[in-house]
């Protein structure tokens, strides 16, 4: 019996035996070039990924910058800008929301440029411009330059983002710090090194000082590290812990002194139902972004990073709020970049003739959203008169700083 012919099969490399990756998500993870144009065209698209979102956010934020009237949510910043430097520095941690490091920044800023309403809103505008640019740059790095342009544009088109850019509140700095921390984490996980983790710890430091509740983002980062990069878990834990210490200390001092972290409440059915509208500006926008985010699945790196960023902090805050008043939908604004990036990752997989109309629809849905917080005659929205809110400042020794009366949101 004659032997059959023998066929020689080539040996498959380790990268060729994995699960099929139709979206090329693992290309970035393996260190290879992302699909798309090369050379000067790719460089131009990477520049556009951060420049276009920055310009769009700057234009939309500037439109709201000069809005008439001072919103009730802006009164703590306006009060801090006009207050003298305290002789008793313990007032700084009696009410974390009313006197945060952000309000110290506003006090110093007011000393340079004055206390007019547009002047006090400029730091928020600058923070949101930088945040939009960083969102575009990070998305371009981990996905594609097209995804970066879409992510930054989606963030800028959200009514709550452009509103935050035109109001004197700490939330734009919190959002910027969240983008910085997540971008630093991705860089540290890509090429682990001492100085990269030092940079990550510095971003976490800014995040915690901007608002202690934003430290919930570390739970999402921790999940990402344990699930995808377990070998650097020790270095991440050290950097995250050291960076979170000042913010945690500020929170502990405030609670010990009888202060509170702003207008927090237990989440009732009405507050939860209103949360999508508060977070995205229009509840329908939340549904659109959620639907688009589903198409960024399966949970592969780097999609898992942004999914954890979008989902884990709200769930943890909701769990904590079951035991103590801790719910505040506006605080969760720092999750908007994650939702925008997930939606952009899905849109970048289709042709531009489909993604552009989706952006137009999102802009049209968000266009009717009110400015919020300010009325045409300059009066405060639905919460106390400005004279009532600003009365009693600076606080007397031994008494906590007053806080504007608010309702659960």
Image (tube, helix red, strand yellow):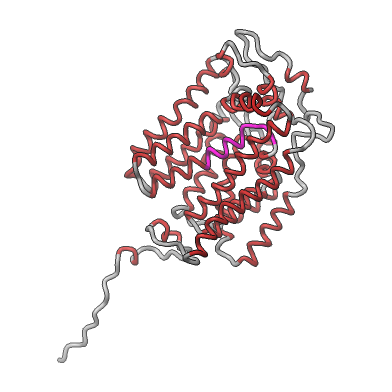
Residue 83, position as x, y percentages in the image:
67, 18
When asked about the image quadrant of residue 242, the answer is: top left
In the visual, does 78 lie left or right of 308? right
Residue 204, position as x, y percentages in the image:
47, 34
When asked about the image quadrant of residue 245, the answer is: top left
What residue is shown at x 65% (from left), y 53% (from top)?
Answer: 288
In the visual, does 123 lie left or right of 147? right
- Based on the picture, tell me whether residue 172 belongs to the magenta stretch: yes
Total residue callouts: 0
Q: Is any part of residue 264 visible from this angle?
A: no
Residue range highlighted in magenta? 167-179
In the visual, does 353 lie left or right of 223? right
Up-down relation of residue 399 to residue 31 (above or below): above
> Farthest front residue?
112
**Nearer the observer, 222 or 146:** 146
Q: Is any part of residue 146 visible from this angle?
A: yes
Residue 331, position as x, y percentages in the image:
61, 34
**Nearer the observer, 133 or 153:** 133
Q: Main secondary structure of the magenta part?
A: helix
> Farthest right residue?
377
């Amino acid at each position: 019996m004659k032997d059959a012919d023998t066929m020689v099969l080539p040996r498959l490399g380790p990268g060729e035996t994995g699960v099929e990756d139709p979206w090329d998500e693992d290309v970035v993870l393996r260190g290879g070039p992302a699909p798309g144009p090369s050379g000067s065209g790719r460089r131009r698209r990477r520049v556009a990924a951060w420049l276009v979102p920055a310009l769009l956010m700057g234009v939309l934020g500037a439109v709201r910058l000069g809005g008439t009237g001072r919103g009730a949510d802006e009164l703590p910043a306006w009060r801090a800008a006009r207050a003298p430097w305290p002789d008793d520095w313990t007032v700084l941690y009696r009410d974390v929301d009313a006197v945060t490091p952000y309000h110290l920044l506003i006090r110093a800023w007011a000393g340079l440029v004055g206390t007019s309403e547009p002047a006090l809103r400029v730091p928020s505008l600058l923070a949101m411009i930088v945040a939009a640019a960083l969102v575009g740059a990070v998305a371009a790095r981990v996905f594609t330059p097209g995804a970066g342009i879409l992510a930054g544009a989606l963030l800028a088109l959200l009514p709550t983002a452009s509103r935050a850019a035109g109001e004197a509140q700490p939330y734009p700095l919190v959002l910027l710090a969240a983008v910085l921390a997540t971008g630093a984490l991705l860089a540290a996980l890509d090429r682990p090194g001492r100085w990269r983790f030092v940079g990550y710890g510095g971003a976490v430091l800014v995040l915690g000082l901007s608002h202690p509740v934003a430290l919930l983002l570390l739970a999402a980062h921790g999940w990402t590290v344990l699930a995808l990069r377990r070998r650097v878990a020790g270095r991440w834990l050290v950097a995250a812990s050291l960076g979170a210490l000042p913010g945690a200390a500020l929170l502990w001092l405030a609670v010990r002194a009888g202060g509170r972290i702003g207008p927090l409440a237990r989440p009732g059915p009405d507050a939860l139902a209103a949360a999508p509208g508060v977070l995205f500006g229009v509840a329908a926008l939340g549904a659109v972004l959620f639907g688009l985010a589903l198409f960024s699945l399966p949970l592969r790196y780097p999609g898992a990073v942004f999914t954890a960023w979008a989902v884990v902090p709200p769930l943890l805050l909701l769990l904590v709020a079951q035991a103590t008043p801790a719910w505040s939908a506006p605080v969760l604004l720092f999750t908007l970049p994650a939702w925008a990036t997930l939606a952009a990752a899905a849109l970048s997989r289709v042709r531009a003739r489909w993604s552009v109309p989706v952006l137009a629809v999102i802009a049209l849905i968000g266009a009717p959203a009110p400015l919020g917080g300010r009325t045409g005659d300059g009066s405060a929205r639905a919460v106390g008169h400005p004279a009532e809110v600003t009365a009693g400042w600076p606080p007397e020794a031994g008494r906590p700083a007053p806080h504007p009366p608010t309702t659960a949101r």
